[in-house]
Amino acid sequence: MFPKKALRNFLVGACLLPLSAISGAAEYDLMLATTTPSTSHWAKTLETFQQLAAQYSDGHVNINASFGGALGNDTQLLQKTQLGSSVQGAYSSGANLGSVVNVMRTFDIPYIVSDAQKSLDLFYPNGQLGGPVVDELQKHMAKKNLHLLYVVPFEFRGILTTEKAVHSPADMQGLKIRVTPSAVERDMITQLGAGATTLGISEVYTALQTGTVDGLAIPPITSVAFALGEVGKQFNMLNFQPHGSFMTINRKIWEKMPADLQAKVQQAADEAVMTTRPLYDEALEKSVAKLQEQNVTVYVPTAEEQQQFAELITDSATAIATQDFSSEEMEFVNVLKRELSNQL
């Protein structure tokens, strides 16, 4: 961990240094892409990783970064990462990854992970990426030519709508709700009586503005990052579904690196996550305040209202998440449940 003063000075320097300044005749020149804005905390983690990777590898690894969906939407970036030609790595949500790596669907189960710190403890049990869950996950990702590089603190989805306030499942009846490619999310939305429309996050603003959809399940931070408070006016802080952001890299490209260089890059990734951790707590507080400044009504549901949603969606979502799992995939579920139980 960096001292707070050193962290602050480092992050300021990272923000001021242009991305193009990190260049040169690197042995490994990698493009990591994301749909998130360049001003977001996700970008700060990537920029910090970018700086540290260059430093720790003595210039042998150069990380280029593309923000704001310039190289494609979430689904396209994941596909490009698997191919490894124009994009070698990308941020991807757990829901998006679940369309490629089956076991990732487990993280879509409502309330399976309860808060951001527990999500980090799960993936970084000793301050470094690793542990039983990561070991099992890497096996499954390798089969899809992907490698997990880092995980940032989980967020939790609420429900943003353009006009109608949602306080109970009955309020979802008849609404058109944007969903990710996740079968689990689609099932939850339909179980609540709404229609599901699959869209990339970069397409949502216009869809809300034109009435193509009436709302979506989204964390407040992501909502603000994509300026959705400008078109949505009701937000229920339901926190009913985890929303993980995972930085993945092309597996074959990763394996081409010698072990000592892999270790240096992984150290850079681990430290980037840990040093920017406070930014995620700050972003949550600021995002709720920002929504309210934009005249969005932010509603905190009661425990009874939370239970109404849970009773309708949890069992069905769990069944959808794990349907057709192989014995190896069920072993991942068992390991995950055991490690989450150990956190209690």
Image (cartoon, rainbow, N blue to C red):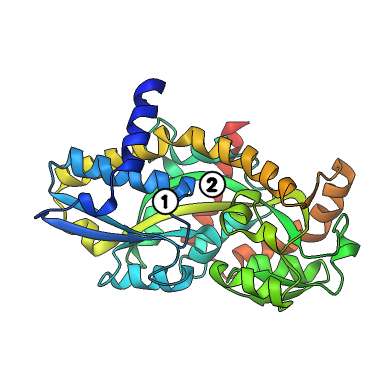
Residue 136: mark: 1
Pick the front one: 277 or 6: 6
Give me the residue at 44% from left, 47% from top: 151
Residue 89 vs residue 240: left or right?
A: left
Q: Nearer the viewer, residue 193 or 65?
A: 65
Q: Nearer the viewer, residue 232 or 239?
A: 232
Tell me if I can see residue 269 in this picture: no
Q: Which mark is residue 336?
A: 2
Query: Seen in the image, is 195 located left or right of residue 139?
Result: right
Q: Earlier in the sequence, mark 2 or mark 1?
A: 1
Q: Position of residue 263 (x, y in %)?
A: 22, 41
Q: Which quadrant of the rendered structure holds the N terminus?
A: top left
Label 2–label 1 contact, CB within 8 A: yes
Q: Amino acid at mark 2?
A: Leu
How many angstroms separate mark 2 from mark 1 (CA)? 9 Å
| Residue sitting at x 42%, y 50% | 43
Near-viewer residue (40 or 26): 40
Residue 271 image offset from top left, x and y in percent: 34, 35
Q: Tag 1: Cα neighbours inside 10 Å, few (<14), some, or many (≥20)? A: some
SS class, disc 1: helix
Q: Residue at x 28, y 52 (%)?
A: 19
**Quadrant where the C terminus is found in the figure:** top right
Instruction: Using the image, determine if residue 262 lies above or below residue 30.
Output: above
Residue 315 percent across, percent down from the top left: 75, 59
**Which residue is depicted at the point 34% across and 46% down?**
47
Q: Secondary structure at mark 2?
A: helix
The quarter holding residue 9 reads top left
Question: Can I make out residue 138 in this image?
Answer: yes
Where residue 157 appears, as percent x and y from the top left, is 67, 53
Residue 124, which numbered label?
none
Amino acid at dot 1: Glu
